[in-house]
Amino acid sequence: GQNIDQPTEMTATEGAIVQINCTYQTSGFNGLFWYQQHAGEAPTFLSYNVLDGLEEKGRFSSFLSRSKGYSYLLLKELQMKDSASYLCAVTNSNYQLIWGAGTKLIIKP
Amino acid sequence: NAGVTQTPKFRILKIGQSMTLQCTQDMNHNYMYWYRQDPGMGLKLIYYSVGAGITDKGEVPNGYNVSRSTTEDFPLRLELAAPSQTSVYFCASSYAENSYNEQFFGPGTRLTVL
């Protein structure tokens, strides 16, 4: 089967750094997405990795290791507005997006 | 560009009733998707379409039907509503189904079946 694992919930402090991990086992790999979803809203695109390494975009970075089936999303200088769920999704060999259940990130002042 | 729009935003149905969830996109995307998201869970694919006139089942299609008569519209039909269909429904679209298939989501429809 195909599976994506993420922690269910994480807590961090405003101004700090947090790393959200994602491991995947899918039938093939054609890219990995991270989406942000605020409570009661639709998911919105954050980042995309298809090659190994780190992609940086402002306060957010995403890392991929294809050999390990592993990715992480790194959020720096946390702000209260970063409180949301973060969804990891993998494009498999059939170009279908397989979604993880998401990690709820709680930011405390 | 309105992006992906969905109607209605909220709906309460009685068991056995039927309804259609509307979805429209104005980005000229070929691919469209319907997902459901239960509380605390990830997105489950119900149906998808790769172009007008072509639809296919996703992971959880039972109890639902779709049609794609135009590029813009992809309605989802519930024929006999059941409490298990209480969920948030998201419609999404993407330009192409390749490795970079970023999906754009509508605001969702919150459906309760009592």
Image: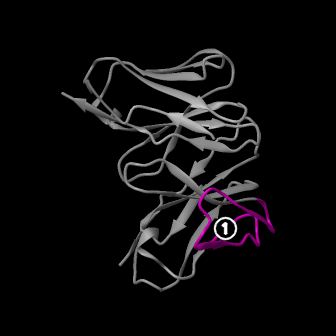
- In the picture shown, does residue A99 fall above or below A68? below
- The reply to whether the magenta stretch includes residue B19 is no
Residue A17, quarter of picture:
top left
- Percent coordinates x, y for residue A82 in the rendering: 35, 33
Colour basis: one colour
Q: Relative to residue B21, is residue A103 drawn left or right? A: left
Residue B42 location in percent, x, y? 48, 47
Percent position (x, y) of residue B95? 73, 47
Please, what secondary structure does the residue beneath circle 1 have?
loop
Residue stretch in magenta: B50-75
Q: Which residue is mark 1?
A: B74
Towards the viewer: A11 or B16: B16
Q: Is residue B69 magenta?
A: yes
- Residue drawn at 51 percent across, 40 percent down: A100
Taking depth in this image into account, of A91 and B30 the one nearest to the observer is A91
At label 1, the amino acid type is Phe
Q: Nearer the viewer, residue A105 or A47?
A: A105
The main secondary structure of the magenta stretch is loop
Provide the chain ID for the residue under circle 1: B
Q: Quadrant of the N terminus of chain A?
A: top right
Q: Residue furthest left?
A: A109
Give residue A75's position: percent from left, percent from top: 40, 22
Residue B107 appearing in the image: yes
Q: Residue at x 65, y 73 (%)?
A: B65
Write the residue at 33% across / 19% down.
A77
- Crowd class of label 1 (few under 14; some 14 to 19; many from 20; radius 10 Å): many
B51 displayed left or right of A89: right
**Which residue appears at 48% of the width and 79% of the height?**
B81
